[in-house]
Image: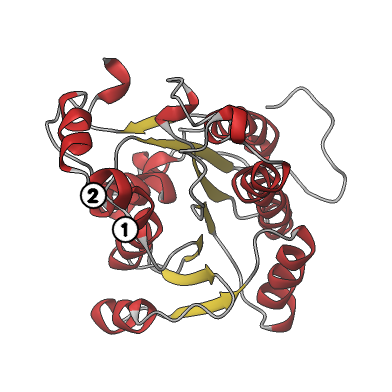
Amino acid sequence: MASFPLDDHFPAVPNVCLGETTPTPSLFDLAGKTALVTGGNGGIGRGIALGLAEAGADIIIIQIPGEVSDFPQQLAKSTGRRVDTYDCDLASSDAIRETVKDVLERDGRTVDILCNVAGISGGFVPILDETDAHRELVVQIHYHAVYVLSQLIGRHLAERGQGGKIINIASIAAEKAMTRFSVYGPVKAAVGQLTNSLANELAVYNIQVNVLYPGWIHTPMSARSFGDAEASARIVKTVPAGRWGKPSDFKGVAVFLASAASDYVTGARIYVDGGTHSM
């Protein structure tokens, strides 16, 4: 158990090896669980939301205020799961707190799994041209929003005393310095270290916190590079798997990290990059 003093409000929750009593397929079953996914309408978030719903979880999608998407309805129809959306400006920590309050208190929902996926394009800005406004926005969306949501949902999970899961998203840019990524890369590195801190502090409440490191994934955020045939070819040459990744490549690993199959896995960094990090 952790060596630091526990918060008196949150009792410790033992970590039990369910593999001793549960058949392997059942370890991945998410029936009865609810996952909150930021940015769940598109890109990696969509792939993760789809994977979790197919494994049995109900889904709460945090979306950009005013965002119009038919994905939540399609997801509910194709999986038979409950899918709800909440508008929230992740650029505002106060807005995040209000949205979480609406989810947990106003609407009486419980959350078992938090997936911090939402992001904005933080690259392609030369360091000599970077502005305070853009830098601060990238930091807010990719770090402060992750911190605040993890704190709020982490407290909710600790209060419930039934354990839980938090999945964060970093980037290979956190470990491979890239030109015109002077804000995005370092901030994603901070997300990796934040994951370690969360994993260490929350383990005593049987809450596992892990982080995924995507490589070159074909999403709306990467459309600029994917759409440039020459640039795309250069990128693929750096990927041992020989292709761009797809949002659906995140389905399986998300289900693993959200399920009982990963109850003894916390603070882990998992690369979903076709082997790019090993080059």
Q: Which residue is mark 1?
A: 47
Q: Which residue is mark 2?
A: 246
Q: CA distance from mark 1 to mark 2?
A: 8 Å
The image position of residue 221, as x and y in percent, is 39, 52
Any part of residue 28 in sight: yes
* Relative height, residue 26 to residue 123 (above, below): below
**Local SS, label 2:** loop
| In this rendering, the label closer to the viewer, 1 or 2 | 2
**Local SS, label 1:** helix
Give the left or right position of residue 154, taking residue 37 as reference.
Answer: right
Tell me the quadrant of the picture where the N terminus can be found: top right
What's the residue at 36%, 78% (across, down)? 81
The amino acid marked with disc number 1 is Gly
Q: Are marks 1 and 2 in contact (CB under 8 Å)?
A: yes
The image position of residue 243, as x and y in percent, is 14, 37
The amino acid marked with disc number 2 is Lys
Picture quadrant where residue 261 is located: top left
